[in-house]
Amino acid sequence: MHKYFEFEKLGTNYRREIIGGFTTFLAMAYILVVNPLILTLGTVKDFPDALRMDHGAVFVATALASALGSIIMGLIGKYPLALAPGMGLNAFFAFSVVLGSGIPWQHALGAVFISGVFFFVLTLTGLREKIINAIPIDLKYAVGAGIGLFITFVGLQSAKIIVNSDATLVGLGDLSKPEPLLAIFGIVITVIMMTRGISGAVFYGMVITVIAGMIFGEIDVPHKIIDKVPSIEPTFGAAFSSFSDSSFYTTAMLGVILTFLFVDFFDNAGTLVAVAGQAGLMKDGKLPRAGRALISDSIASSVGAVLGTSTTTSFVESTAGVAAGARTGFASLVTAGCFILALFFFPLLSVITAPVTAPALIIVGVLMVANLGKIDWTRFEIAVPAFLTMIAMPLSYSIATGIAIGFVFYPITMLVKGRVKEINPIMYFFFVIFVLYFIFLQ
């Protein structure tokens, strides 16, 4: 196993990979709770129950899709990258498609399945890999830094250290409350261990935060360890039922499919670049085995739709595992195993609260913005698209939107500067695509 994943070449070992994989799971375990809540429209009180997805089935689909996606990525892509139903895409699925447009959830699953198939075909042609490798190195660094800022903001927000403000849009939360206090404790502990160079500091920080939360009553001690696994029957294969319904073949559904396709592609591309960059896996600005990683993502997306969940994609929380030492696909297999076990140990997930995961996300953000030092800020034509890519991600709450804005400005500044020969033709194509995206799909 260590030969297959090239442990010696990448300077890793089983201990680091296991801790890294488990850390990634802890950082993204919230998806097992949040995804079923979103897809079943659990926060919408007046929505007919007959039109909702089954909560238990979605939970099982989420766990299985995450496990299978991570296994595929680990074995084929060999990246320390875990997959799960993507945040943002699940909200679009539930609130825009099902609730907003009145489209049955079966049709929405069908759209996710088709978008995954399109991804797979694009990847087999080599087009997806060419696109990622065509992205200028400075923009790749900006994407990594931008995602670092984005997940830091997510961590601060989830722990209520940063809150909504009617006056200034965002503001500092009430730090005297237990939730932000616990998160701050976790941040301090993790920072101390990271500064001391302790291996697995991110993981140990999360464990200590959980223990502290239990001691002070902020985190409930689980009263039950094992529970019965719900049935997946209500959602399994439901995506295929939409294909026999004539109402599925409409312009509106085409727009839904294209949106799933667009957002997943660039969220995945950005996350892959960020994780590979942080792990030191990029060579000459390019991603080795990028095609395999992208194939893994496309397969996982379609498999997830068959199981009964929204688009399964690469999770940026994988950077927490990388920070804890993960460097190979073996860590993804560990994460997958944790998702499978979670089917039986769901009550234990109650300890993985926002204050527990927030320190990991914030610390990872600190590590990822190191990419800023690699960007050529002395050239204004590079600095503008790089800065806009980076800053737009947290401000728009979207990795894809940040990439789109940067891709629009890059050809403009490079053309004006007279550096036409340095622009890959693919970047012109995306300039047009992203302009149309902002006009018609935003």
Image (cartoon, grey):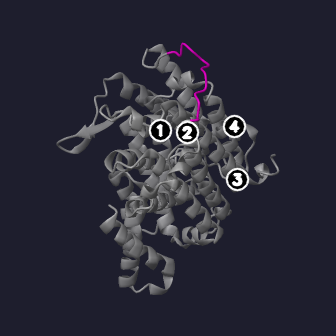
Q: Nearer the viewer, residue 189 or 2?
A: 2
Please identify the dominant SS of the magenta region.
loop
Which residue matches tag 1?
A: 35
Work out whether mark 3 precedes mark 1 in sequence or the reverse, and give the earlier one: 1
Q: Residue sitting at 72 percent across and 37 percent down?
A: 15
Mark linked to residue 62: 2
Side (left or right) of 240 relative to 353 = right
Q: Which residues are magenta?
A: 221-233
C-alpha distance separating marks 3 and 4 = 15 Å
Q: Residue sitting at 64 percent across and 48 percent down?
A: 80
Q: Name which residue type carries label 1.
A: Asn
Q: Nearer the viewer, residue 331 or 346?
A: 346
Question: Neighbour class for label 2 at 10 Å: few (<14), some, many (≥20)?
Answer: many
Which residue matches tag 3?
A: 78
**Magenta-span inclusion, residue 243:** no
Contact flag, marks 1 and 2 (Cβ < 8 Å) = yes
In the rendered image, residue 388, in percent from the top left (x then y), is placed at 36, 63
C-alpha distance separating marks 1 and 2 = 7 Å
In the rendered image, residue 50, in percent from the top left (x then y), is placed at 41, 34
